[in-house]
Amino acid sequence: MSQSHNKWVVEYLLGNANDFIQKGLQLPPFRLVRICKVQKSSVVLGSAQKLFQLPKWVNEANIDVVSRRSGGGAVWICPDHYVWIDVFLPFGDVLICREISSSFFWLGTVLVEVLEKIGLQEVQMYRGSFVTTPWSSAICFSSKSPGEVFVANKKVVGISQRRTREGVLFQIGIPIHLHLLELSKLFFATEAEKVTSEISKTSLELDGLATPTLIEETFLSTIHHF
């Protein structure tokens, strides 16, 4: 379903993670926001990650494992527990910045305003250089990237981008529940509990603080001004 939202066209999609990744390859000549609602639990790998031999319990749980075209580590997505928003700017749009790091800042500004509007405090956008950890090549929410948003120095919003001749696609991930233990078991089986504990120190779940619908509706009303 699509609708016009002033300068933005808004699409609402229901489906699985692979559907949304394939849809992200179809880029229009106008500003677009896609609200993607998964209907099946999925592990989404970053573009630099290679498919690996899955533990038996993942296959038994009937969880999709797919790869996106943008960078970063893996995220675990469950229906009603994850906000997935794609934002596309067409070539020549005034919001596109040539410098890669700074190109996230306008969107980070939007997201800070969104989280403040829904009542979160100590919300900040990270403006520094990319920061890695021993786990960040595997798990998304254990790194820091320019434009990402933190609450009391804990990461709540992940952003990645993909640039093409048509423009720039930003992919926003806001986990309501991070599923860190499950991800840690995938990549760090023998140290899963330790890795989960370490990443929990620098990331924040929004379970009980916000719902996907509230975040999505507030995002649309806020980006309307950009």
Image (tube, grey):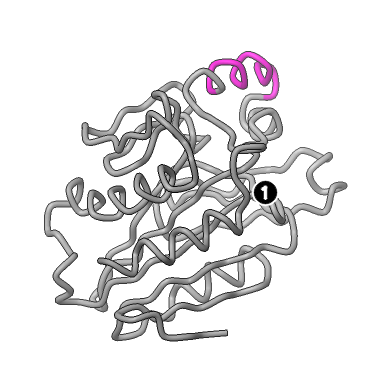
- Does the segment drawn in magenta span residue 218? no
Identify the element where label 1 is drawn.
loop
Q: Is residue 162 above or below residue 101?
A: below
Q: Locate residue 33: give its quadrant.
A: bottom left
Q: Residue at x 31, y 77 (%)?
A: 31
Q: 36 or 135: which is nearer to us?
A: 36
- Counting from the top left corner in percent of width and height, residue 190 is at 69, 17
Q: Quadrant of the C terminus?
A: bottom left
Name the residue type under label 1.
His
**Which residue is rendered at x = 63% and y = 50% of the image?**
211
Q: Nearer the viewer, residue 165 or 206?
A: 206
Is residue 193 one of those drawn in magenta?
yes
Where does label 1 land, which residue? 81
Look at the magenta stretch and give its main secondary structure.
helix
Among the 4 quarters of the image, the one containing residue 132: top left
The residue depicted at 67 percent of the width and 49 percent of the height is 81
